[in-house]
Structure formats: structure tokens, C-alpha cells
Image (spheres, coloured by chain):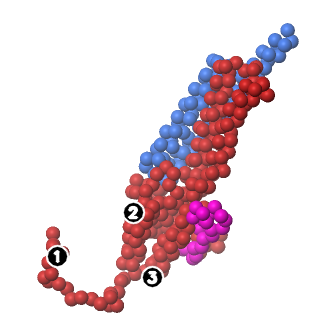
Chain colours: A blue, B red
Amino acid sequence: MLEQITALLGDYLLKIGFLILDGFLVVFLFVVYKQALAMRRVINDNGTSGLINIVALANIVIAISIFVAALVIL
Amino acid sequence: MPDIFIGEDRKPEVKPEEIKIKPSDKAADETQHVKTHSKHRHSHIFSAYCANPPREVVFANSGDNEELLLFLRRHFITNLPWILKALALAIIPIILEIFNSFGLFSIQFLTTPDKTIIYFFYYFFIFGGYIFVNYVTWFYNISLVTNDRIIDIDFSDVVFENVSATKLSQIEDVTYSQIGVSRSLFDYGDVLVETAASTNEFEFASVPHPEEVIKVIDSLIGNRRHA
């Protein structure tokens, strides 16, 4: 009984810990994206700056997808 | 269109010592020299030194007649420490799996879907977070030399952003230091630009070909003074 409770508690802790970490990563990547946008206004190397912004945005989308996947799978 | 091979109506020859170039012409000549005699004219995602970059490179508050002559970043080799750290972090799960298979370390409490999502998150954190942020930090740490100003754009730790600029007429001295084996080997160093204001110093840290940078800035300052 105690072992089952411990295992269940461990699972929940793992899930909550993972979701918190991923949440922080989403926020951090959002800050990176905003800064990349701001820097593009300072200096714009036409092709490359745009590419960086796209990658920054893609990172946010992937991080949110991981968050959703973790909610479902873990 | 006049034919240059027809020898009629030739102007009287002028001896070399009689040719006097106006200072403004000299400045234009020097700018032209920088634009045409450089080997590093292409800009790409890993370029750290670009002389006469393409017109697509634009910066905030640029003047109407302002031309970009040098576009500098830290030498790409300075990124080696974080690249090595990222590689080391990337092989940790592989080592864990090897240990797990030999029974030296157990991660049996994790199911396959758990492991999949955790490893995916881990590698995403390395590539999307660590590597990307370090790359962006390197990418947006830029120094610019135009025919009118010197601009230093500092970007670090994602949240720190500082842009400083000075007119060429305010520059007093330009020096560079190239200390260390790797700096000599890969030809990069720090260029220090001292301005009239006592507190204002511009440091182009770890830029490639510092000698060429000095030459360009020196010639621009010299031409300004002559003008």
C-alpha cells in the first residue's frame, strides 16, 4: 500500500516538476523571441535576422507542444 | 559612348608629381579602396568579418549618405567553449543509456513514453535553448564602421542590450591587442577605439583581422582630419 502511494506520489512529482520546467522554458523562449524582434529593429541583416526570428518562434511552438504532450503522456 | 582606344584629342600628359588629390577625393578614394580591395565581402550566418557588406544589411538611425564599410562580430572560434559544453551535455543521455544497459545505473522506473518525452525535452533544451541563445548572443554582438561613425551593439544574457555610437571626428586613437596562441593562430584580437570623451571607449572584442580594422579606421580618421 505504502509502496503504491510512494510510486503514485513519485509520478505526480515527476509530472509537476517537468511541467514547471517546461513552463519556465516557454517563458524564457518567449523573452528570447521578443529580444530577437527588438534586435532586428536595431540591425537587420535582411535574410538572417528573419531566419532567427522564425527559429525563435518555432522554439516557442515546440516548447508548448512538449508541455501539452507532457500533460497527456506523463 | 567614347572609344578609349582612339588617340585623338588627347589631353596633355600630367606628370605624377603634378597631380594633387583634394582631401575629399582622397577620402572617397580610401572608401572605394575599402570597398573594392577586400577578400571578405560575403555575409552569411557564420560570418564575423565583412568588408563592404551588401545593401540588405541595414541598421537603425543610419544617415542618408552613410555607407557601411565594416561589419564585425567576435571570431566564430570564440564560440568553441559553449559548443563543446553543448556536445558534452548532448552525450549525457547516451552515457546513461549505456550504463543502464550494463546494469551500472538504473532508470527502469521510467516507462518508454516517459523517457521519450524527457529525452525530447532535454535535447530541445540544449538545441532550442542553450545553443540558440548562445548563437543569438554572438549574432547580435556587432560592431559597425561606416564612413561617418563607429557603432558598437552589445547584446548579452538575452536581456542586456546596449547600442553606442561615435562620430569619426571624435576618435582620438585606435589600438589593437592580439595576445595568446589561439588569437595569433586564427588572427583575431581586441580593437580599442578611444574617443574625445574620457569615459567613452569602444572595444571591438575578439574581432577577426584586427590589423585590417585598424587600417580602415585609421585611414578614415586621417582623411577626416585632412578634409
* Mark 2 surroundings within 10 Å by alpha-carbon count, few (fewer than 14), some (14 through 19), many (20 or more): few
Tell which circle, 3 or 1, labels the residue nearer the N-terminal end: 1
Q: Nearer the viewer, residue B63 or B143?
A: B143
Label 2 – label 1 distance at C-alpha: 38 Å
For this view, does B134 lie left or right of residue B4? right
Question: Which circle marks residue B5 in the picture?
Answer: 1
Mark 2 or mark 3: whose residue is earlier in sequence = 2
Q: Quadrant of the C terminus of chain B?
A: bottom left
Can the viewer see residue B192?
A: no
Q: Position of residue B218 (x, y in %)?
A: 51, 75
The label nearer to you, 2 versus 3, is 3
Which quadrant would residue A29 be assigned to in this image?
Answer: top right
Task: Give the magenta-colored segment's residue range.
Answer: B163-192
Do tag 2 and tag 3 residues touch (Cβ < 8 Å)? Answer: no
What element does badge 2 sit on?
loop
Chain under label 1? B
Q: Chain of mark 2?
A: B
